[in-house]
Amino acid sequence: MEKNSKPNEPLVTHIYTADPSAHVFAGKLYIYPSHDLDHDEPSNDNGDQYKMEDYHVLSMDDVNSPVVDHGEALHVKDVPWASKQMWAPDAAYKNNTYYLFFPARDKDGIFRIGVATSPNPAGPFTPEENYIPGSFSIDPAVLVDEDSKAYVYFGGLWGGQLEKWQTGTFVPEAEGPAPDAPALGPRVAELSDDMLTFKSEPKEISIVDEDGNPILASDEDRRYFEGPWVHKYNGLYYLSYSTGTTHKIVYAVSENPQGPFVFKGTILTPVIGWTTHHSIVEFNDKWYLFYHDCELSDGVNHKRSVKYTELKYNEDGTIQTIDPYGD
Ligand code: FUB
């Protein structure tokens, strides 16, 4: 049991945590983070330093309550298809079951997305034998819509391998699009009713500017990099994501869960550390941004800590930009 949580402070300090996916389940806040390992090995652009092996689920009765670490919820050694790198997960509730969606490298080193289930939001979770057929890349985020349809959004550049799937198959040497070509978008797939497979092949999401022109690959302040999250506000779908190399969380809006999404602006300015990754959740009539940074580890990129802060909308539905170190 940790001390009471406070905005912009690590939720827990006994382990490093990152990539928080926050949900309200059974009236409580549950956070599904990555569990960063405390090692001192070198870093590279392939993300080999992110060598996470398991997941811990955190929960809070309220945003000012102590945070409970429910212990190990799933370990890579128990996932028959996975070899390493249990990266950013998400969770969903449907069919009286909690589903943990997670990426990991398969035995050939290719990132895939798996599912594990539990009757309890804190796990432990039992993994399926194989990854979701047709899945690839990283950072799954699941939206269960008001009509009960469920969508999984995913994809990440560089270590996340998204650019290697441009032809529909894995091409190890493939690079991203030319600077003046449309940027790669995240992928979306509707999930089957049992949440274990894709209903159809994943589609690429288009992100456009206010004039309807695709955001270009060279536009690193706005183009998609990794870490998608979709939430609904006033009937609109908000797709937020990391811009990677420019270290922002930005967002785009659509009337359709599968897009196209129109770019709107910045939610979170850069945090301490290379990666930025977030989720957005409504709890007790307020909205919260969960994010991570590397303040606790003095800037070590692979030793991150999950934090939260309140998120506010303007009258027109746009989101107010958050500076995590402002007053
Ligand atoms: O935690 C490993 C990777 O770092 C995640 O999958 C990315 O979103 C980035 O946060």
Image (cartoon, rainbow, N blue to C red):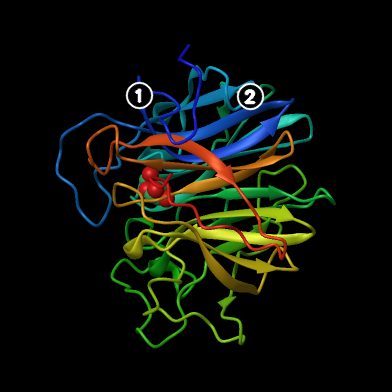
- Seen as rendered, the residue at the extreme front is 327
Where 157 sits versus 100, above or below?
below
Relative to 6, 211 lies left or right: right
Residue 200 in which image quadrant: bottom right
Residue 211 percent coordinates (x, y): 61, 87
Relative to 143, 157 lies left or right: left
The CA span between labels 1 and 2 is: 21 Å
Disc 1 secondary structure class = loop
Residue type (three-letter) at the residue carrying disc 1: Ile
Where 8 sits versus 249, above or below?
above
Residue 92 in which image quadrant: top right
- Name the residue that disc number 2 marks: 62
Viewer-side residue, 322 vs 137 = 322
| Residue density around tag 2, few if under 14, some if 14–19, many if 20 or more, within 10 Å | some
Disc 2 secondary structure class = loop
Q: What residue is at 49 percent from the left and 71 percent from the top?
A: 168
Residue 131 visible to an observer of this rendering: no
| Residue density around tag 1, few if under 14, some if 14–19, many if 20 or more, within 10 Å | some
Residue 78 percent coordinates (x, y): 45, 26
- Name the residue that disc number 1 marks: 15
